Image: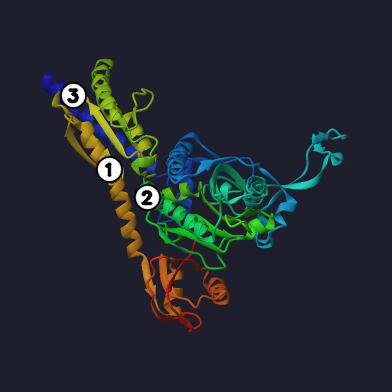
């Protein structure tokens, strides 16, 4: 009888493993592979991992709870870093008078095509009974721009705040939404409305303002590498690529798995342009008057796209532990309520020990889904570590540990499992960064001829370091012919004499080129 039971148990176990494997394959088959169609893979992953979905408003998105939980962790960490560098949060209006934009010519030119404009403030019932129409008697005296960025409204406000050197510096940041009416959109990467933070600071000297702009691009780089696990190249933008109204724009550029660059954060030295536009002056210590010096800087939910495209694979999302909403999931494997009760008791001990170390843990004892479904689901959602516990684990004093980044599993002792998992999470965080660094190194090329440049660009191979003569004319010609842009002049680019790959004119540094999102 015992032999028959054992044979039946083995058969059931094998069948269950087959069912899990088969279901897992079925789930993963829904995702297009990256090699087959990278863009489609990205779109499918964002939706299937429950990060976001398109809304009924063209070009806008709904960020779902799981996606927003990741953004919240980004926001919390960045906010802490901003406050550690002396910044405070404020909030400024969503609507900006149209006249404000005309005060800074290059700024309005840079954003004019993307502005959403409010012209009326009331609706009324259609006299023909066809719903509602705009009430033409409710036209605004001055049209309002829905915030594409806040330099103008903030500098109009700063005029009231700043009178003397004693009022400086002002180090404000705001967390907000902005609208830029994009025609071609993609979830997180480019939408008509998105979330971001924008810092706007005011200073007494050009040196202070430049130091601020450089400090904040370093904060962004620190965040990208140590939390997103994304290596970035810091540099200064070309005149053609800099922010509208800035004297200099600093950037961090990341390389995605498809060989395209993603601008992941920018910091701008605005000089005195906006202070002059809004007549913001201050009395200096020596009694003379001068215009205030300014910066602005920001990152957005585009970082969600960077996170997805840097680490994820054909099985789904891969999240760095520091930003994962769920760092560890525990899945019980049981046959009856008695087994579940025993497993739950032990699992709660493990959960509490992990939480005592600051690790976020979910115990999934939902009996409406099988373990195989749960394994596939948490893999798709990128949970860094999965723990599986069954009756035999209880007998042996062991637990199965699966890591999402390498898709490997091992069986470890219950003893000190909390310490083991804590070290494992740290290892996963480091491994993701190193893997991304290795990929970038393997896909960064020094190019000395235009023919080789075009070949690399055609294949979208990655970052290209090439000599450029520094002129807008050459930059525009290269972009027109290849679609590649100057991403930046890297801060750490060594002095190197050479000739421009396009014009043959002298060049003293290599610029970083790429096809970009």
Q: Position of residue 207 (x, y in %)?
A: 50, 60
Q: CA distance from mark 1 to mark 2?
A: 16 Å
What residue is shown with label 2? 311
Q: Is residue 110 above or below residue 402?
A: below
Which residue shows up at 31% across the image and 46% down it? 429
Residue 266 x, y percent position in the rendering: 50, 56
Q: Is residue 502 above or below residue 8?
A: below
**Which is more toward the observer, 253 or 246?**
246
Residue 517 appears in view? no
Query: Upstream in the sequence, badge 1 or badge 3?
Result: 3
Q: Please name the residue that numbered disc 3 is placed on.
A: 394
Real-space Cα separation, disc 3 to disc 2, in angstroms:
34 Å
> Which disc, if any, is residue 426?
1
Q: Would you call the spot at circle 2 few (<14 residues within 10 Å), some (14-19), or many (20 or more)? A: many
For label 2, the SS is helix
Q: Secondary structure at mark 3?
A: helix
- Can you give x and y, in whole percent of width and height, for residue 157 in the image? 66, 46
Foreground mark, 1 or 3?
Answer: 1
User: Label 3: few (<14), some or many (≥20) within 10 Å?
Assistant: some
The one of 131 and 490 positioned closer to us in this rendering: 490
């Amino acid at each position: 009888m015992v032999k028959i039971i054992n044979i039946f148990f083995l058969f059931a176990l094998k069948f269950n493993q087959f069912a899990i494997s088969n279901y897992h394959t079925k789930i993963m088959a829904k995702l297009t592979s990256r090699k087959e169609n990278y863009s489609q893979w990205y779109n499918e992953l964002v939706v299937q991992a429950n990060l976001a979905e398109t809304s009924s408003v063209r070009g806008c998105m709904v960020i779902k709870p799981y996606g927003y939980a990741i953004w919240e962790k980004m926001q919390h960490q960045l906010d802490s870093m901003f406050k550690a560098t002396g910044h405070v949060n404020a909030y400024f209006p969503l609507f900006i008078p149209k006249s404000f934009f005309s005060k800074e010519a290059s700024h309005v030119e840079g954003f004019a095509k993307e502005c959403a404009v409010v012209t009326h403030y009331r609706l009324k019932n259609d006299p023909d009974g066809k719903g509602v129409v705009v009430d033409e008697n409710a036209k605004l005296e001055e049209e309002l721009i829905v915030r594409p960025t806040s330099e103008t409204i903030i500098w109009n406000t700063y005029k009231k705040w700043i009178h003397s050197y004693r009022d400086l510096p002002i180090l404000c940041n705001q967390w907000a939404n902005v609208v830029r009416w994009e025609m071609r959109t993609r979830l997180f990467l480019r939408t008509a409305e998105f979330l971001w933070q924008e810092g706007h600071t005011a200073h007494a000297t050009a040196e202070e303002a430049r130091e601020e702009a450089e400090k904040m691009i370093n904060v962004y780089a620190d965040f990208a590498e140590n939390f997103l696990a994304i290596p970035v190249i810091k540099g200064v933008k070309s005149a053609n690529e800099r922010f509208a109204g800035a004297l200099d724009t600093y950037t961090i550029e990341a390389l995605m798995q498809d060989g395209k660059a993603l601008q992941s954060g920018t910091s701008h030295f605005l000089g005195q342009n906006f202070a002059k536009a809004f007549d913001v002056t201050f009395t200096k210590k020596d009694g003379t008057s001068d215009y205030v010096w300014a910066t602005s800087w920001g990152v957005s939910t585009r970082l969600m796209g960077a996170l997805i495209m840097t680490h994820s694979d054909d099985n789904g999302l891969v999240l760095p532990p520091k930003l994962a909403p769920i760092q560890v999931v525990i899945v019980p494997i049981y046959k009856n309520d008695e087994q579940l009760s025993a497993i739950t008791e032990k699992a709660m001990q493990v959960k509490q020990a992990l939480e005592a170390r600051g690790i976020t843990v979910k115990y999934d004892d939902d009996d409406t889904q099988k373990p195989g479904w749960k394994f596939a689901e948490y893999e798709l959602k990128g949970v860094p570590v999965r723990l599986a516990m069954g009756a035999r684990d209880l007998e042996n004093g062991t637990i199965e540990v699966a890591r999402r980044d390498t898709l490997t599993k091992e069986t470890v002792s219950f003893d000190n499992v909390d310490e083991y998992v804590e070290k494992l999470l740290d290892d996963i965080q480091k491994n993701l960064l190193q893997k991304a660094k290795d990929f970038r190194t393997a896909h960064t090329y020094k190019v000395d001829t235009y023919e080789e440049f075009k070949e690399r660009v055609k294949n979208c191979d990655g970052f290209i370091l090439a000599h450029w003569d520094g002129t807008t004319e050459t930059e525009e010609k290269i972009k027109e012919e290849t679609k590649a842009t100057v991403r930046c002049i890297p801060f750490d680019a060594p002095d190197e004499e050479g000739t421009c790959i396009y014009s043959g004119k002298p060049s003293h540094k290599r610029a970083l080129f790429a096809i970009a999102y």
